[in-house]
Amino acid sequence: MTAAFRVEPWAVSIAGVDVEHLAQEESVFGLSNGHIGWRGNLDEGDPRGVAGSYLNGVFEDHPMPYAEDGYGYPETGQSVINVPNGQLIRLLVDDEPFDVEHGTLHRHERRLDLRDGTLHRELEWESAAGRRVQVASTRLVSLRHRSLAAVRYRVTALEPVAVTVLSEVLANEPLPSPHADPRVQELLSRPLQTVDSAVLGSRTTLLHRTRRSGIHVAVSADHTVSSTAATVPTVTVEADRDLARTRIHVALAAGEELEVVKFVGHEWSDSLTPQTLRDRADEAVEEAVRLGWEAVATGQREALDAYWECGDVRVEGDPRLQQAVRYALFQVFQAAARAEVRSVPGKGLTGSGYEGHTFWDFEAFVLPVLTSTAPDVALQALRWRYATLDHARERARTLHLDGATFAWRTIDGRESSGYWPASTAAFHINAAVAGAVMQYVRATGDRDFERDAGAEILIETARLWLSLGRWDDDGGFHLDGVTGPDEYSAIVDDNTYTNLAARRNLRGAVAAARRHIEVAERLGVDDAEVSRWNDAADAMTVPFDERRRVHEQFAGSTRHAVWDFDATRPEQYPLHSHFPYFDLYRKQVAKQADLVLALYTEHEEFTREEKARAFAYYEALTVRDSSLSAMAQAVIAAELWHLDLAAAYLAELAALDLDDLHGNTAEGLHIAALAGIWTGITAGYGGMRDSDAGLSFHPRLPRNITRLGFGVRLHGCILHVDITPDDTTYRLSAGDPVTVRHAGRAVQLTAGEPVTLPTPPPESPLTPEPSQPRWREPGEAREDG
Amino acid sequence: MTAAFRVEPWAVSIAGVDVEHLAQEESVFGLSNGHIGWRGNLDEGDPRGVAGSYLNGVFEDHPMPYAEDGYGYPETGQSVINVPNGQLIRLLVDDEPFDVEHGTLHRHERRLDLRDGTLHRELEWESAAGRRVQVASTRLVSLRHRSLAAVRYRVTALEPVAVTVLSEVLANEPLPSPHADPRVQELLSRPLQTVDSAVLGSRTTLLHRTRRSGIHVAVSADHTVSSTAATVPTVTVEADRDLARTRIHVALAAGEELEVVKFVGHEWSDSLTPQTLRDRADEAVEEAVRLGWEAVATGQREALDAYWECGDVRVEGDPRLQQAVRYALFQVFQAAARAEVRSVPGKGLTGSGYEGHTFWDFEAFVLPVLTSTAPDVALQALRWRYATLDHARERARTLHLDGATFAWRTIDGRESSGYWPASTAAFHINAAVAGAVMQYVRATGDRDFERDAGAEILIETARLWLSLGRWDDDGGFHLDGVTGPDEYSAIVDDNTYTNLAARRNLRGAVAAARRHIEVAERLGVDDAEVSRWNDAADAMTVPFDERRRVHEQFAGSTRHAVWDFDATRPEQYPLHSHFPYFDLYRKQVAKQADLVLALYTEHEEFTREEKARAFAYYEALTVRDSSLSAMAQAVIAAELWHLDLAAAYLAELAALDLDDLHGNTAEGLHIAALAGIWTGITAGYGGMRDSDAGLSFHPRLPRNITRLGFGVRLHGCILHVDITPDDTTYRLSAGDPVTVRHAGRAVQLTAGEPVTLPTPPPESPLTPEPSQPRWREPGEAREDG
């Protein structure tokens, strides 16, 4: 049983409060701008699932515990912590504390508005003493003002009452502990040391410092207060070590109202002085006070309007998918919008799951969406990876490899993984970073970025692949002992996805080195090295099982025993919680699309027949214990005309967080999987593929979808695609003409001149609809937790 | 620089005291009977390297820390702890404490006598005040009286002095911590809680309990005191929570002597009451007091005489090897002699290295020596493994496997490994246990043990292999995803050593199930199951590289890149301390003999040509970062007539602990490697091989060895083998006639009728002498630390 959100085109809303679902709802209602993250905790703080107020990049170090140590194991872990929480607005009605679990809640509504970028709450409450008030709060984390979050809090008396509002900033709220180790728990339980606290006029400032990671955090708050009451509200302000509190008191007659607007400014740094941070946080608040709530809220709407202009996906005929894709885009956008050379964690800033770490799926799943819909945001994220390149070089040196290898899980760029077979060995993250660079440059034409950062990433990762690889006696190039995307196999030779992604990476490095000769020279690249990259790319091994006529996930994979799916009970999923890695690794069972992901990302490397055979083969082995799986399955199912199956996978992705499909949305949203909804629609139903030759489309609508529209940013313009079962219209917003392919045919597009072409007719699939392992059909998989 | 022991045939001795070497010497001079272990700490306790007083089976639990958790990871670790230390005898000369680092040490000798089973110490010391005394102490841990350790401590005055002897039993001495985790450190820093302490007459008793593992320990002590002085020594006795102290004081004239004999009784249990333990410990001491030192010391000598009757190996022409093999046999024997259904740790009871855990090498390396020289001791050890069978069944169930899988590292039988790729996946331990059962039954004819325990082990491990295995489409049987003996590769398919050992295990189970039908029936074995074992054994895959015409260590191993030995600097060994597992696993480099170990243990599976090619191939890849490697290399080098190379490996084994070759003898002796000296000599120079067909020999003496003699216990008798370059004589001590093979020829031996045959002439090796990786030739490897 999960929270039941209403199906609406531009909002996610829910009535009532069920404490059981609070933690999930807090994630779903999370607001962020990529710098600040506020979980959708109730204003008054209690009851709560998990308190969450994060600043992107603020974490605490902790020692990593190993039962048996090994060379190259990271010694220091990183865990996101709660920064001082500015959400809190506690209410007393005639000195009786407002609490949804006490008194009588006559009405309670929460609504996340995807166009306004606000979380709105309305309620009517009667205290145990019988006093009734209405409360309306609206919260935003500003997309326009990077340091700013704000709440407008209105209390309306339904009968004469004295109202007290305690608006707080509270430090050192604990997070759920990621580690059993009490050392780590102790470090993370009160991670912030007070540096200073101050009250200046009505403004409060708290200055804190993390104990080990040495990060300073400044949180300032100020309030504007107005009331229709006869008496002027009294306002008192105080600040202690871990608490800043503004107390507003007023007596209201029936129908009178108190409005408190709270502005909270957030800054942090591991190098600037706390005084500088305080100035900046104060200034953010002062500016907001000067602008006032309406201007801030209008700015929020405008920022989202600008995003939706290209980003919006219109899905007619499937209201759930319509809501889900907009919700997903909203969350993807706000996770990264103002991250500005900081990482975007797997959970965004909506929860502390995965300790706030960023993984490969940011580049592989999230960045393609941002590059296509908000390339300025994508650029910032790529600059963050570039900023970690020295850590990646250092890590490669530690591993005795050339070039650079990026951290598998990290906050600040340093490797924080504790299980090397599924982290250090997963070198494909480097190809994901390189691929994101290449896609960004193709989509934007941003040669400055390529020169200043992208080429260096491509070159250093190409060097990594060369030093990782092995030449065989017959001239083949191999990557031994690596782990691909599927985490139910590890330390394998010639993972097809990795090899093909590395090939692309190598070829990208060749092209970049030739385009940016001065960069290549600076990095000591000579012609011989470029030739070796080319040779390795050409000689890259792609393992194929001649007997079964299917691509192998890795060398020899199809020889292994097939997992005994019939003997596996539904409650034994996810498998890694019920079976040892030992057994998973040596059998044919895929946690997530791996070879099938390659069918999409490396689409030019496979014929349609090969894709059909591979999809049929791997569908029967893929259990989707990872939320990263369904996207590729949806895309390839659609490409192969299994449109019902594609729809089922998309429905599963749509339900992932809104229906808490994996039972862990409480820990934060699955940002990459959410991004996959966009990809599933555009690459699946739109048939969109990206390659050096440009964009191509092959629209294929499932039966229930009567119209599909989406946009893609291309060299600063927007390409709008509008698909019906009969026609597909391409419309370029501005700029130079562009050639795309429609169902294999080249189409020249000129700005302002829409081109309408017949939507290609449905085709028969080459194979019967593939079947999944028992209990793991896309519909059934919803049953597990 | 390591301690320099004298080369002597029946002793290990050293002059002087160098505090730098104390920790190594304490291990080398360790005394044990398999129940009690006393490191060779100086009597007076300080200076010390590492204090060590152990009781086999006394350990403390601790939580196992993981940076990232996984299904089936053991949650509880086990660490050996120090039990109350009864070694301590502190001396004051005119109230000046005797300390080898203060005053003047005119003479200091320690000598481990391998026939007497005593550690003898003699010294002459002059206090800062100029008072001179001679001290002679002799220490033993009784092989005849399981609970008893004893010290005879004599002080002779060289001028008039007052002498005070403080003889103590001291609890809660800390061990070096095996874990960085402070939880674990805290638990292990004072692991013992006092239950009771008592003084009864001159006898003291300390009763303690471990905090978490719930083990009670009783240590009692009593003393006999005599003196040639005019005045009678005064004796006072006291006991506190963690200390029992006996104070003996006497005034000595020049030439007068004080003799204190200390008897210490040790008992422990996790089920008996502490009172019972106290009674038993007291009784052991009372019995010893009644017998007196001379009788106890005579009993010690007799127990060793009985062992040496068969166990002694006589090596003429190589005094270092002569000393080393006797030292090794002494340590192997005393590590297990009175273990009596307890494990024998990798370090014996000579140190806390590996946390006091037992590994596969006990069955694979140590038990063959014990079975051949002290089968009663071997039987006890096998009974210990059998006693852990329920834990092994439980572990198999956790892993969703049939039958039983024994703990990779443990004290009490429960799995305590923290890194599954090199533990859980190393299923070959089960074949080692099964192989030890089979060898024991062959050597002793002990069908009772086979019926009561051995058959069950064979059957349950056979079931394990069946459930681990996979049948291919062509009828081949495979073991995927396992780790063989070589820890520089892991999680591989069809490890040849494992597959062949499993084949032997399966065939052993078939035979045992047929011999013991009632056991098979009790375990639910039917004919179909036995057939499956047979079929799997017959169909077991043995990977072979047709191109290179060499057996693969595992499927595809020879395709991998060869480690870049030329680029590896000598200080980068051992490799696992300087390179990640990731890189080691995917390249051709062997920490230790793996395929080469199979050439010995599964000798019937290879032709001589195959052995020669395989040995040449794998010698070039084997770096011997494990002390378990050289034995098999010595044996196979000898078999292939590379006798200089065999000698070099044996010299390395001889130096391992006596010269502290790996720099870690301080943590305890390498018992399995020491056992390998015996195997290297008997199987290498003696060419002894064991199989269902009986023992075979093929003597091959290296140039410097003029005569080699050793004994093997066979069905209760001793087969003595006496080899010179010209002749080999076989002599059966008693019992029924036995057929052995000599250089391929069957020879019938009758008790009391020695048979002398020509020693086979030297042959030319089939290949040039193989080379090792750079810096890793057997001589050079001594240089690393």
Image (cartoon, coloured by chain):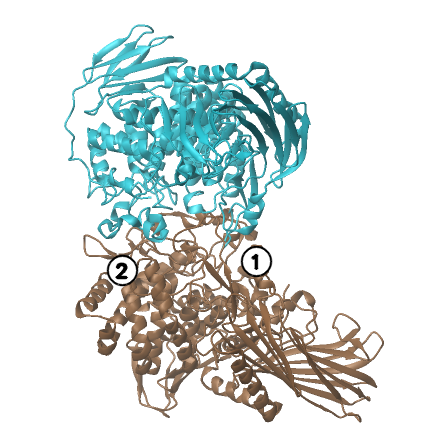
Chain colours: A cyan, B brown
Q: Nearest the camera: A623 or B459?
A: A623
Q: CA distance from mark 2 to mark 1?
A: 42 Å
Residue B323 pos. (x, y %): 55, 77
Tag 2 secondary structure: helix
For residue B633, side relative to residue B738 (left or right): right
**Quarter the N terminus of chain A occupies:** top left
Residue drawn where x is 42% and y is 46% of the image: A421
Q: Nearest the camera: B11 or B28?
A: B28
For residue B16, side relative to residue A149 (left or right): right
Q: Which chain letter matches label 1?
A: B
Residue type at mark 2? Ser
The answer to whether residue B192 of the structure is visible from this angle is: yes
Residue A183 pos. (x, y %): 57, 50
Which quadrant of the view contains residue A679?
Answer: top left
Judge the density around disc 1: few (<14), some (14-19), many (≥20) Cα neighbours within 10 Å.
some
Q: Nearest the camera: A7 or B222?
A: A7
Residue type at mark 1? Asp
Which quadrant of the view contains residue A607?
Answer: top left
In the drawing, what numbered circle is on residue B784?
A: 1
- Reading the image, the residue beneath label 2 is B467
Whether tag 2 and tag 1 are in contact, CB under 8 A, the answer is: no
The answer to whether residue B642 of the structure is visible from this angle is: no
Residue A121 pos. (x, y %): 44, 26
Discs 2 and 1 carry the same chain letter: yes
Judge whether A131 appears above or below B427 on screen.
above
Compare marks 2 and 1 and give the one earlier in the sequence: 2
Judge the density around disc 2: few (<14), some (14-19), many (≥20) Cα neighbours within 10 Å.
some
Which quadrant of the view contains residue B208?
Answer: bottom right
Residue A648 pos. (x, y %): 24, 33
